[in-house]
Each structure stands twice: as C-alpha cells, then as structure tokens.
Image (cartoon, rainbow, N blue to C red):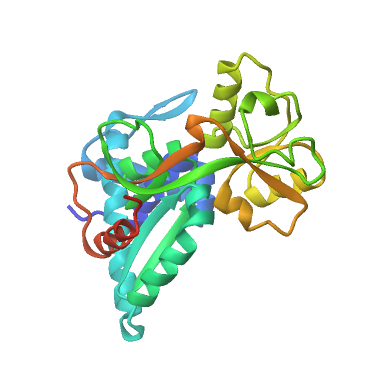
Amino acid sequence: MKLDPVSLRLFVAVMEENAIARAAAREHIAPSAASRRLAELEQQLGVELFARSNRGSQPTPAAYALLHMARGVLNDLDGIAAQMRDYGSGLRGQVRVVANISAITQFLPDELQRFMARHPQVQVRLQEQISTAIARSVAENAADLGILNEGAYGDRLQLLPYREDELVLAVPATHALARRKRVKLADALPYDVVGMHPGSAIHNQLVRAAAEAGQELRLRMQVTSYDALCSMVAAGLGIGLIPRQSALIFRALAIRLVALDEPWALRRLMLCLRAQEAPGGVARLLVEHLQAGAAP
C-alpha cells in the first residue's frame, strides 16, 4: 500500500474544516478532485471514512482513528522536509507547541529565546489556544507539547509542573478600589467588568467565583487579549482579572493592580504531554529546558 501524503493532508483538512469545499480551498485543490482523492483513500485503506447520505457526510470512528495517525505521519514528513531543506543552515528539527495566553505573555518569550539560542537548529512552532483546546490538541497529536492551567483533562494526558502565576484585579487609576492593597472578589463585583473571551480559564474562574459569592457578574464587554483588557480598563470601562506579570507589561497605562484575597488567585501552569508516550528528539529537549526553569 502506498499512501499519498497529499491525500492524507487533505483528509486532515476535511476533518478540521468539517466541509470538503473549505478543505479543498485550504489545500488549493478543486472540490471534485478532493472528493475523488477521499474516495481513493477509502479504497486504498479498505474502510469507510465518511458515512454519506442526502444530508451530507459524517466521519466514521475509523476517520477519527486515522486523524490521530495521519497528523503524526504528516508531522514526521514535515520534520524530514524541514531538516533536509535547512540542513545547511543548521536547522535540523521542529517541535509543535500550544500554550495559553498566560504562559505566552509571562514566561515563554524568555524561555524560548534561551532555548533557541542554545539550540539554533530547532524550529519551535507556537500557537495560542485556551486550556481545553490545548489538551485536545496534544491528545489528538496536533501538537507535541502543551502549556495549560492545572486541571483534569483525562487519562490520555500527563501533566508536569511548570510555573505559578497570580491573578490580580486591574482597575482604572482613579477607581474606588485603586488605593486598596488587597480585596475580596465580592468587593469588586458591584463594578462593571471587562472580561476575557468565553471559554478562557480566567472567564470561567470569574463566573464561578461570582456564582459562589451569590452575586451577579456585571460583564460589560469581553476581549481576546490582555492588551485589549488593560486598554479598556485604563479607559475607565470596567475592572478586569489578569495575571500580575502579564499586566506589568502594560504598566505605562493608567491602571492599578490590586491583589486578590482569594485562594484561587494563585494558579499553577502545567506542561502537557501524551500519556504513555515519552517525547522524542527536539520535543524532549524543549521539555527538559522548560522543566529546568519550573517552579518547585
């Protein structure tokens, strides 16, 4: 059996885009040619990958099994191509990393700079995701390594300690809470809130804490980045929850940071790997580097 990498890449695109037309556009191939390639792939494998009906097509269990394996094969092929193409320049490996915004803004810039200075032959492909998506990407072999908030993500993953961070309140410089050194969240809930986007760990924590306090969350707006949050807070549009070190990047803005007197304000970030599968090659080098700087 000779499997065509182009067909495998197209199959992965169809699974990720959930539509042949979008997958075909992504892979720069005509939809009719994409359908033909998928049919040929099914014939080669001797298994139905998509259950077709007049309402469309749905992936079969075999398709989900193939997705995990295909991602691994394509990553290996990409690694071979990258190493051979860039061998003369010393670039001889790559590692796929997914991390949440807290890790990216607080710790990874310095960590990756030191790692890549020590290993200039390694290419790090970094993508930002929320913690639940990170767990899924690592479990499904769409990434080699993840960095996420501590939590329960299933037995397909193993978590290793990485760093700790502290959530604080960012408030406008002239706000009533600006002169306080520490506050309970209940003291902040009467005010308008600038929140992070739905599904983010900080948003979920804020909603959960407000519910436990029996108070309504006055969510005025939601943003997708810490710089947007701090800018909105500085403009007087509300208060926000943010990791302390991330907020310090924007200390030139007219905001004040107030410590939270809450046990959940201190968080743990974890390295996330596939269970029962030791990282190899350059992924192992990066894991060792990040563990060396991990919080005790």
Query: Between residues 101 and 61, which one lies in front from this camera angle?
Result: 101
Please state which of residues 191 and 132 is positioned toward the viewer in this rendering: 191
Q: Residue furthest top?
A: 214
Residue at 54% across, 33% down: 199
Residue 163 showing in the rendered view: yes
How many numbered circles are shown?
Answer: 0
Q: Decide if residue 254 is on the left or right side of residue 263.
A: right
Residue 92 placement, left or right of 177: left
- Snapshot quadrant of residue 83: bottom left
The spot of residue 152 in percent (x, y) is 35, 30
Residue 88 occupies which quadrant of the picture?
bottom left
Q: Is residue 154 above or below residue 228?
A: above
Q: Is residue 27 above or below residue 139?
A: below
Decide which of 112, 163 is in the foreground and name it. Answer: 163
Residue 80 is situated, as x and y percent measured from the top left of the image, at 28, 69
Q: Is residue 221 above or below residue 216?
A: below
Would residue 18 be seen by someone viewing this image from the given angle? Answer: no
Residue at figure coordinates x 23%, y 45% from the top left: 44
**The image quarter in which residue 57 lies:** top left
Percent of width and height locating residue 50: 36, 32
Residue 139 percent location from the top left of the image:
31, 40
Q: At x 52% / y 53%, what residue is drawn? A: 26
Q: Residue at x 37, y 57 (%)?
A: 96
Viewer-closest of 56 and 296: 296
